Image (cartoon, grey):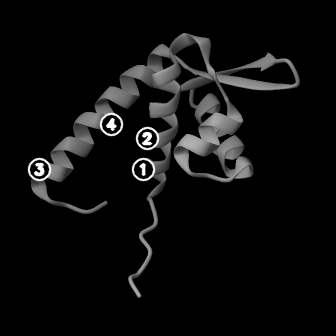
Amino acid sequence: MSKQQYRAEIGIISDILQAAMDKGTQGIIISSIARVSNLSHYTAVEKCQKLVGFGLMESRQYKRGQIYAITEKGIQFFRELQRFEEYVQALKIRI
C-alpha cells in the first residue's frame, strides 16, 4: 500500500487561488472552491477567511451564502507563487 501524500498549506492556498482566478471578478461559491480544491466545506471556509484577512480574496454576500473573489493583491501573489513553484520543480525540490 502506498503512503498518501498530503498537500502543504501553500499547495492548498494555491489551489484555492487558482479556483478563484478561473472565475475572475464574478467570484466563486464556497462549495465550488471546496470541490475544485478537494477540501471539506469547513476547511475551505477556514482557508478562504484566512485569505480574506490577508487581502488576497474578498468576500461578499450572495443569496444565502458567500462568494469569494480574488483581489488584485491576490492575483499578484498567485503569479509569484506560480513562479516559485516552477522554480522549485526545476530544482526537483519536493515541498
For this orientation, the residue located farthest to the top is 25
Q: Which amino acid type is shown beneath numbered disc 2?
A: Ser
What residue does disc 2 label? 14
What residue does disc 1 label? 11
Q: Which amino acid type is shown beneath numbered disc 4?
A: Leu
Left or right side of 13 for 88: left
Among numbered discs 1 and 3, the one appearing first in the sequence: 1
What residue does disc 4 label? 81
Among numbered discs 3 and 4, the one appearing first in the sequence: 4
Which residue is located at x 44 percent, y 32 percent? 18
Left or right side of 91 for 95: right
Label 2: how many Cα within 10 Å (few below 14, some 14–19, many 20+): some
**Quarter of the image where one finds residue 36:** top right
Which sits in the foreground, 87 or 22?
22
Q: Position of residue 38 (x, y in %)?
A: 56, 51
Q: Which amino acid type is shown beneath numbered disc 1?
A: Gly
Q: Position of residue 17 (x, y in %)?
A: 48, 32
Left or right side of 92 for 41: right
Q: CA distance from mark 3 to mark 4?
A: 14 Å
Which residue is located at x 64 percent, y 31 percent? 53
- Tell me the SS state at disc 1: helix
Contact, CB < 8 Å: mark 1 with mark 3? no
Among numbered discs 2 and 4, the one appearing first in the sequence: 2
Contact, CB < 8 Å: mark 4 with mark 1? no
Q: Which amino acid type is shown beneath numbered disc 3?
A: Ala
Which residue is located at x 63 percent, y 29 percent? 52
Contact, CB < 8 Å: mark 3 with mark 4? no
Quadrant of the image containing the N terminus: bottom left
Label 3: how many Cα within 10 Å (few below 14, some 14–19, many 20+): few
Q: Position of residue 74 (x, y in %)?
A: 47, 24
Q: Position of residue 6 (x, y in %)?
A: 46, 66
What residue does disc 3 label? 90
